[in-house]
Structure formats: C-alpha cells, structure tokens
Amino acid sequence: MRKERLILSDLVNANTTETEAFQNSVLRPIIKMQHTLLIAFFKSYLIKRKIDFSVLSEQKKRAKIKSVLEKDLQFKNQILGAILGHFSLDEYEVYQNNSSEFNRRIKQIITKRLQDSIAEIK
C-alpha cells in the first residue's frame, strides 16, 4: 500500500509563524498519514509491557497514553523516528534548527491523536 502525504491547506495562512507553518504543512500531514502505524505501535507497546488497556477507565486510558509518551524514551524515540523518516532533506534541515520545539509538538499531536482514537486501541 502506497501512502501519500495529505495537503492540509486550510491550516496555514498569512498570520502563521514559521514554526506553526512547518507543523501544519509538514508534521500534521505526516502524522495523519502514519495514523494506523501509530495505533499499531501503541498496541504493540501495551502487549510488550503486559498492560491490560481494556480494564482502564476512559480517563486512565488517556492518562496512560500521555504517560507513556512522556516517560518511555525508547517508545517516544520510536514514534519520532516514524515521523522523521518521512522528511525530505529540506524539511529535515528546518527540523534540525528547532528540533526540541518540533519534538514537543510532535509528541503533543500524537498524544492527542492516540487519545482521540482510544476506540481503535483494544
């Protein structure tokens, strides 16, 4: 199956900062394109760590997702790699100039996306 990056044109306008423009024109489309892979990564994480996600309340599921992405550096780096691997050389150069800010934004977007997709995580 060939994946193509979506164009989310309605997110960038004249008042958008460079960081926001990169987030909305590069990061969000890649993360959206990788949605099913991100879900699979998280399911695999739960299995490897023997976490029974199904018995947790909705609130605890959301907290667990946030906690995993904040505390498990190996998992977080795996997720970042799945996103960074889709950068062009020019995009990577922009990323390198402010990597810590972009990593924070990637983590936030993915946390929200996983939390909004709890029904897909069984």
Image (cartoon, rainbow, N blue to C red):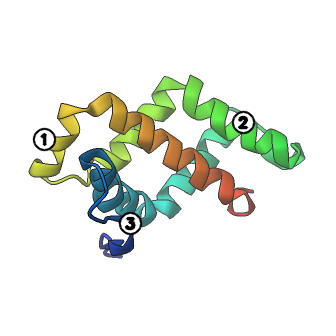
Q: How many marks?
A: 3
Residue type, mark 3 in image: Leu
Residue 38 is left or right of residue 89, and the answer is right
Residues at discs 2 and 1 in contact (Cβ within 8 Å): no
Name the front one of labels 3 and 1. 3
Name the front one of labels 2 and 1. 1
Crowding near pointer 3: few (<14 within 10 Å), some, many (20+)?
few
Query: In which quarter of the view is residue 93 placed?
Result: top left
Tell me: residue 6, above or below residue 46: below
Q: Provide residue 66's location: percent of width, then percent of height.
A: 64, 36
How much space separates mark 3 and mark 1, taking CA atoms?
A: 22 Å
Mark 1 highlights which residue? 93
Mark 3 / mark 1, whichever is N-terminal: 3
Mark 2 highlights which residue? 64
Q: Provide residue 18's location: percent of width, then percent of height.
A: 24, 48
Tell me: residue 14, above or below residue 112: below
Crowding near pointer 2: few (<14 within 10 Å), some, many (20+)?
some
Query: In which quarter of the view is residue 96 placed?
Result: top left
What residue sits 47% from the left and 27% below the top? 74
Mark 3 highlights which residue? 11
Q: Provide residue 64's location: percent of width, then percent of height.
A: 72, 36
Residue type, mark 2 in image: Lys
Q: Provide residue 111's location: percent of width, then percent of height.
A: 58, 45
- Any mark on residue 73, and which? none
Mark 2 / mark 1, whichever is N-terminal: 2
Q: Secondary structure at mark 1?
A: helix
Crowding near pointer 1: few (<14 within 10 Å), some, many (20+)?
few
Name the front one of labels 3 and 2. 3
Residue 51 is left or right of residue 20, and the answer is right
What residue sits 74% from the left and 62% below the top? 119
Relative depth, front residue between 81 and 25: 25
Q: Secondary structure at mark 3?
A: helix
